[in-house]
Image (cartoon, rainbow, N blue to C red):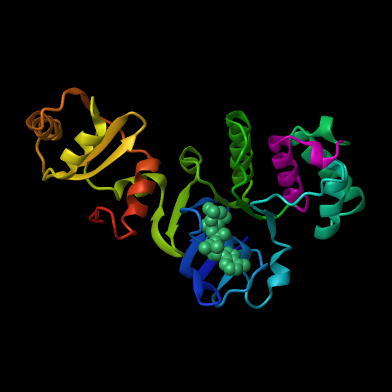
């Protein structure tokens, strides 16, 4: 296997005068689980479609299993399994017939097809559904079927575009266990998700905004990019308190998380709790609780993408 599974070099995709992907470069190592994050419309699916050879780059190129998507897009498909954002299954075909159809698309037939199909029905717990029409399946079962179809030809590289959207927590966990298993066998996975818990399971993450890279690294690396210490504040009049804290020197960012405020305080402030308490006391707002909270990827995602839009607080970046 090549040393690099996927290498994107200044990928650009325009639709008319709109630039959806704006010069993305990254490398994914064999066996890596690579999470691709970004707000809605930031260009994730467009990038994946280019990597799958389904959409030509306007500029730049990418090498998938060593094959150029600009030069030989049709050959890329031998290397990859792809689950699109709207899993494309045929509702009027059964589970098994859908697998046969995708077997045909990927050139898996005869005995090889039967043994692969059996193994995947078993591993993905689909035996009982084998003869059901795809149109009648629940979202979780459709998702497993779509994955089975994408894995039929044993591709070394997987592109999964929001594969877990709409599925329950247990199904999600099983899904990630399978991805981890495949990773141990050397299969490379690029996966998009809006669920930050899932992103924690990835080896590395790429965060994009408006088609450009904002940050790339391990989940811990991304969290380390957010400066300051994070405090959770419970206070009776949360919106008023947020206004007060936003005006307070030493406070970097205030956001409402469920019923509490999350307040990022500059590293220079000796006592973040003291700073917050003094500001709220001065405004005669009754504090219920102030405590430090652990920064999650969700905070990092919000802070790093907010950083890119002009109307919000600017964070210093390391
Ligand atoms: N064929 C197309 N023609 C014109 N614009 C397009 C086309 N495909 C995508 N776009 C635009 O490109 C931008 C990026 O879309 P894309 O689907 O890649 O985003 P995404 O990051 O996958 O978003 P989401 O999280 O909602 O799935 C969007 O503004 C979208 O409307
Ligand atoms: Mg998308």
Q: What is the quadrant of the N terminus in the image? A: bottom right
Residue nearest the observer in this picture, 216 or 304: 304
x and y, in percent, of residue 77 in the image: 72, 64
Stretch in magenta:
132-153
Image position of 188 (left or right of 238): right
- Residue 24 at x, y percent in the picture: 47, 67
Q: Quadrant of residue 79?
A: bottom right
Label count reads 0
Which secondary structure is most common in the magenta stretch? helix
* Residue under the image location 73 percent in, 49 percent down: 151
Q: In this rendering, does residue 250 appear at all?
A: yes
Residue depicted at x 70% and y 49%: 87
Q: Position of residue 194 (x, y in %)?
A: 50, 45
Decide which of 41, 129 is in the foreground and name it: 41
Quadrant into which the C terminus falls = bottom left
Task: Name above or below for residue 45 compared with residue 60.
Answer: above
């Amino acid at each position: 296997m090549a040393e690099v599974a996927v290498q994107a070099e200044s990928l650009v995709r325009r639709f008319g005068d709109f630039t959806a992907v704006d010069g993305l470069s990254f490398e994914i190592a064999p066996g890596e689980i690579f999470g691709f994050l970004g707000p809605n419309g930031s260009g994730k699916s467009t990038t994946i479609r280019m990597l799958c050879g389904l959409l030509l780059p306007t500029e730049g190129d990418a090498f998938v299993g060593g094959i150029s998507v600009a030069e030989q897009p049709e050959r890329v498909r031998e290397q990859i399994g792809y689950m699109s954002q709207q899993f494309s299954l045929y509702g009027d075909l059964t589970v098994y017939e859908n697998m046969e159809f995708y077997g045909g698309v990927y050139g898996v037939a005869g005995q090889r097809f039967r043994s692969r199909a059996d193994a995947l029905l078993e591993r993905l717990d689909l035996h009982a559904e084998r003869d059901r029409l795809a149109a009648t399946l629940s979202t979780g079962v459709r998702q497993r079927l779509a994955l089975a179809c994408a894995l039929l030809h044993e591709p070394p590289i997987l592109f999964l575009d929001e594969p877990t959207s709409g599925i329950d927590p247990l199904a999600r966990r099983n899904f990630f266990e399978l991805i981890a298993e495949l990773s141990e066998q050397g299969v490379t996975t690029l996966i998009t998700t809006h669920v930050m818990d899932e992103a924690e399971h990835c080896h590395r993450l790429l965060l994009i905004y408006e088609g450009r890279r904002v940050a790339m690294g391990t989940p811990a690396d991304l969290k380390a990019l957010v400066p300051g210490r994070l405090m959770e504040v419970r206070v009776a009049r949360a919106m008023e308190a947020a206004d007060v804290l936003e005006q307070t020197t030493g406070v970097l960012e205030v956001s409402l998380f469920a019923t509490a405020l999350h307040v990022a305080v500059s590293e220079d402030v000796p006592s973040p709790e003291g700073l917050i308490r003094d500001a709220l006391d001065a405004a005669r707002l009754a504090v219920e609780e102030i405590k430090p909270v652990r920064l999650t990827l969700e905070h990092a995602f919000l802070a790093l993408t907010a950083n890119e839009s002009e109307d919000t607080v600017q964070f210093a970046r390391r």
